[in-house]
């Protein structure tokens, strides 16, 4: 009987000692997980450099655009990057200073719709309607904040009057048009006159 009790006590003591040896000390560092030695990433590590992506569009459906070389169109006073617009903006710049002439559409003199129709014919081979009013009916209507280079901007004085003016959007709120008081020039949609009479924007498909 005594021998059985002694053996039971020894067995319990052995189990207690083995438990103490197998449990890691409280202050001991935890072992690294297998195959994860390099898996730890600094929480605020600086990202790798990514070049800024450029677009001449106002649309900004922020899709990635290729990094193009910038080109400056002196007569327009604007810089562009997208090469798809180069022919358009360079041809448009050749019209700067052309006097206003109602019913005409040449570099000797042109009205607003004459300028736009001539520009689109020269650059894209597209024949647009000759008046700003009918031109508006022929294009796809878009939101002002979706304007991109080459789109058309239309103006009218009131809901009771037809569209009386049209121009070609460039970028940075600037557009080129033939004005009665200065001929072909670059103006801003932010100018009070054009801001007040801006009616709609259109895109030629």
Image (cartoon, grey):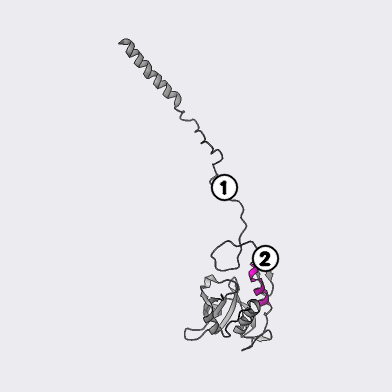
Q: Which mark is residue 45?
A: 1
Please say if 108 is above or below 76.
below
Q: Dividing the picture into quarters, in which one does residue 135 lie?
A: bottom right
User: Residue 103 at what x, y percent from top left?
Assistant: 61, 89
User: Residue 142 at what x, y percent from top left?
Assistant: 51, 74
Q: Residue at x 67, y 76 (%)?
A: 91
Query: Closest to the observer: 195 or 126?
Result: 126
Query: Closest to the observer: 49 or 189?
Result: 49
- Label 2 CA crowd tier, 10 Å (few <14, some 14–19, many 20+): few
Residue bounds of the magenta highlight? 81-93
Q: Residue furthest bottom?
A: 103
Q: Dividing the picture into quarters, in which one does residue 17 lie?
A: top left
Query: Closest to the observer: 183 or 200?
Result: 200
Q: Mark 2 — residue?
A: 70
Q: For the C terminus, which image quadrant?
A: bottom right
Please say if 26 is above or below 185.
above
Q: Is residue 90 magenta?
A: yes
CA separation in Å, label 2 and label 1: 32 Å
Q: Residue at x 63, y 80 (%)?
A: 121
Which of marks 1 and 2 precedes in the sequence?
1
């Amino acid at each position: 009987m005594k021998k059985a009790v002694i053996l039971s006590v020894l067995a319990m003591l052995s189990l207690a000692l083995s438990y103490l040896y197998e449990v890691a000390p409280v202050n001991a560092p935890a072992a690294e997980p297998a195959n994860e030695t390099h898996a730890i990433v600094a929480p605020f590590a600086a990202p790798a450099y990514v070049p800024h992506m450029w677009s001449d569009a106002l649309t900004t459906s922020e899709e990635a655009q290729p990094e193009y070389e910038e080109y400056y169109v002196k007569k327009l006073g604007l810089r562009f990057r997208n090469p798809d617009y180069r022919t358009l903006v360079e041809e448009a710049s050749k019209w700067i200073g052309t006097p206003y002439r109602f019913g005409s559409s040449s570099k000797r003199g042109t009205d607003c719709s004459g300028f736009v129709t001539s520009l689109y014919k020269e650059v894209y081979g597209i024949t647009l309607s000759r008046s700003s009013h009918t031109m508006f009916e022929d294009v796809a209507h878009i939101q002002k904040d979706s304007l991109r280079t080459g789109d058309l901007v239309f103006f009218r004085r009131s809901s009771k009057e037809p569209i009386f003016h049209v121009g070609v959007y460039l970028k940075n709120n600037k557009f080129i048009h033939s004005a009665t008081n200065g001929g072909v020039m670059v103006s801003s949609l932010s100018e009070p006159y054009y801001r007040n009479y801006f009616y709609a924007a259109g895109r030629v498909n």
